[in-house]
Image (cartoon, rainbow, N blue to C red):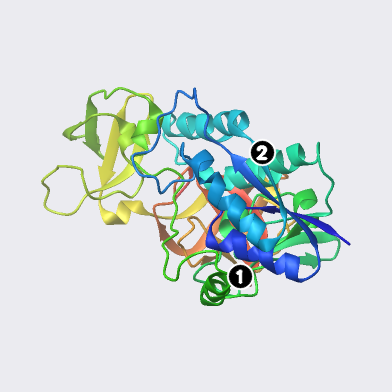
Amino acid sequence: MEKVLVGLSGGIDSSVAAALLKEKGYDVTGATMLIWKKDSPYPAPVSPNSCYNPNKAEEMGEIKRIAARIGIEHIVIDCSDLYEKKVLDNFRNEYMNARTPNPCIWCNTLIKFGAMVDEAEKSISFDYFATGHYARIVKIGDRYAVKKAVDLKKDQSYFLSRLTQKQLSRTLFPLGEMTKDEVRKIDVSLGFHKEGESESQDFYGGDYADLLQSRDRKGDIVFRDGRKMGEHDGFWHYTIGQRKGLGIAYSEPLYVIDLDARNNRVVVGLKSDTMKRNAICGNVNYMAFLDFDDDEYAIKVRSTSPGVAGKVRKISDDEIEISFEHEVNAITPGQSAVIYRDDVVVASAIIERVIG
């Protein structure tokens, strides 16, 4: 009998994923990772609706109840030290260097599919690791790749785009072929949660500025030509493409088009100034293929994007240029550019700079 370790958060999706695998005949063990560090310098979120929160230990009784109802063993794995270093420290460093990171993407590859799996293997043996993510895995030649879920409204392929070949080779996504409605019905029928129970969750349920631990520092808001338009309390309170909250009266709506960390300046311009077509990306993670051809790909530069047609030029093994068919709003350094062919992730890279 093949053994599967399932990431069990206690939510609807992970609970149903574990139950489905058990029903299919796998020997299942549920694993819950702890990422909250009691003596962490990072504050607790004001909202409990957060992956990073101090209440996971209190929720453990409910998670163990679900595991018992499914009839599987359950273990707890402390990943808090590495989470603080690889996710929270990285989040802070990126923001303070005027970049906008994707903490959920790094958490997936480095912590959930990385450290938690590695730590679990020290005490138990298993053949596969599974989660309740909405995505699928395909094999193209000798390479593995993430494919979009059947339920495109719930698709999480963007957040899984940095998984390695080793990680993908032993990963299962039981919900990839299902819709959220189908999963909810199974969840209720098995008595895991009440019908209609809310489960939305964010990386950090509060103001991201709380994680940056930086005192407000006055700086200038300047127009694209250098004219001072106003003042701010720190460039890290702003993101590329932001319109609201600038506090500036002007004949046309203004948007943040650049952040200057060295001089603590926020640069604003018109809507047209936020529209760009080209960017250089680094830290490339190849999935389906190791190269790019002259065909068009669908490229997502944020998780909520449907994907924009564009071409990809390989500069080196670790650097690419993406060129969109038409201008795209607010291409942001630090974010991930995920490249698709049809519904399959070809590669993922980190946006380094916008070049026009």
Q: Is 343 left or right of 243, judged from the image as shown?
A: right
Name the one closer to the observer, 212 or 290: 212
Work out whether residue 293 can be spotted: yes
Name the one closer to the observer, 45 or 38: 38
Q: Element at badge 2? A: strand
The amino acid marked with disc number 2 is Ile
Q: Element at badge 1? A: loop
Residue at (48% x, 67% y) in the render: 306
Q: Is 243 left or right of 116, judged from the image as shown?
A: left
Residue 337, label in figure: none
What is the x, y in percent for residue 80? 58, 32
Numbered disc total: 2
Circle 1 or circle 2, nearest the eye: 2
Name the one closer to the observer, 353 or 13: 13
The answer to whether the residue labelled 1 contacts the one labelled 2, judged by CB atoms less than 8 Å apart, is: no
Give me the C-alpha separation between circle 1 and circle 2: 28 Å
What is the x, y in percent for residue 307? 51, 66
Name the residue beneath numbered marker 1.
Answer: 149
Quadrant location of the N terminus in the rendered image:
bottom right
Work out whether residue 311 can be spotted: no
The amino acid marked with disc number 1 is Ala
What is the x, y in percent for residue 331? 44, 51
Crowd around label 2: few <14 · some 14–19 · many ≥20 (10 Å): some
Residue at (61% x, 75% y) in the render: 178
* Chain-order first, disc 1 or disc 2: 2
User: In this rendering, is residue 196 above or below 53?
Assistant: below
Name the residue beneath numbered marker 2.
Answer: 77
**Which picture quadrant has residue 119?**
top right
Name the one closer to the observer, 244 or 176: 176
**Which picture quadrant has residue 24?**
bottom right
Residue at (35% x, 24% y) in the render: 214
Q: Is 341 left or right of 289, judged from the image as shown?
A: left
